[in-house]
Amino acid sequence: MASITDHVKEGLKYPFNDIKKLLGLGGLFALISAISVFMSVKSFEIFRFGIHMVENTNGNVSHIPFSQLPTGDIYLVVALAIVSFIISLFIFGYQYNIVKFSIDKKEDLPGFNDIIGMLVNGIKYFIVVLAYNIIPIIIMACGIVLIGNSSALAIIILISVLLFIISYFLLIMALNNMVAHDSITKAFDIKEITGNISNLGWGKYVGIIIFTIIVYMIIMAAASFILSMITGVFIAAISNQALIISIFVAVIEGLFIDSYGAIFYNRVCGSVYRESIK
């Protein structure tokens, strides 16, 4: 039986088995990152325009006619948000395939030839993630409504955080169970899911996930530090080009770092499931 570090070591090496496919996934992450930067800039401009209108009319945002707002920018942000969500579904679908390859103990990375299959798997992946987090989200939303009551808010936040943690550990095995059987209903077979975790051992299961998250965070922190250094060089070399620099950094992060982290993490999750069903 593999140790906690064995799963992580194998996961760290796996993305390098096919650099082209690593960069293929990175291209999707890079596209989302670039869109997010552009959306942030446009959203800030819309917000600033709204504040300016409020100051000039001595009213509030609800009193400003929609026709007086920068509707072109608003429609653009909405359209980009939809595009970004669709790209995210393809990323979820690829992560689905990574878990499948890991469970089947395949050493190569999934390809991109089955676009429709990726989209369908991505939709299933998204539905399961949303379903497992919907209750904590609703409770957190109730906490926001009760923001004036500090004691009630603290209790609700604590409950929602605990539920998020519980849901997270169940979600990982649920996604794996869905992928293994290629059935979304298997993601909600709580008896089988908890049984698989028990086969592995709850302590070992939680330990592997926590250790994987720690390694993931270290990788992200180190990469962010390197990117900050690169950003500093660009800022010194290029003045008054904040948007270009932000997009460049976002693309580099998506192309190399986010893709590596996603493949590493899902590979480990799949290998954990494979051991739990032995």
Image (spheres, rainbow, N blue to C red):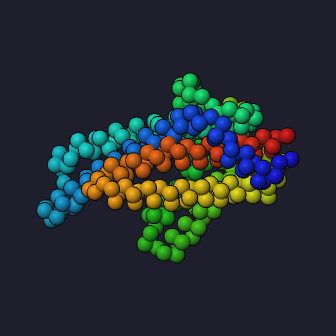
Taking the image as shown, residue 188 lies to the left or right of residue 86, namely right
Q: Residue at x 56, y 33 (%)?
A: 20
Residue 195: percent from left, percent from top: 80, 46
> 65 or 34: which is nearer to us?
34
> 200 or 29: which is nearer to us?
29
Taking the image as shown, residue 178 lies to the left or right of residue 196, namely left
Residue 254: percent from left, percent from top: 49, 45
Taking the image as shown, residue 142 lies to the left or right of residue 70, namely right
Residue 264: percent from left, percent from top: 64, 45
Outermost residue, left side: 56
Residue 174: percent from left, percent from top: 69, 43
Q: Judge whether residue 123 can be spotted in this image.
A: no
Tally of numbered tags: 0
Q: Judge whether residue 1 can be spotted in this image.
A: yes
Q: Is residue 245 above or below residue 15?
A: below
Q: Residue at x 21, y 55 (%)?
A: 49
Q: Is residue 15 above or below residue 113?
A: below
Q: Residue at x 62, y 54 (%)?
A: 216
Q: Is residue 90 above or below residue 190?
A: above
Question: In which quarter of the view is residue 192 placed?
Answer: top right
Q: Residue at x 48, y 37 (%)?
A: 27
Outermost residue, bottom side: 151
**Quadrant in which the C terminus is drawn:** top right
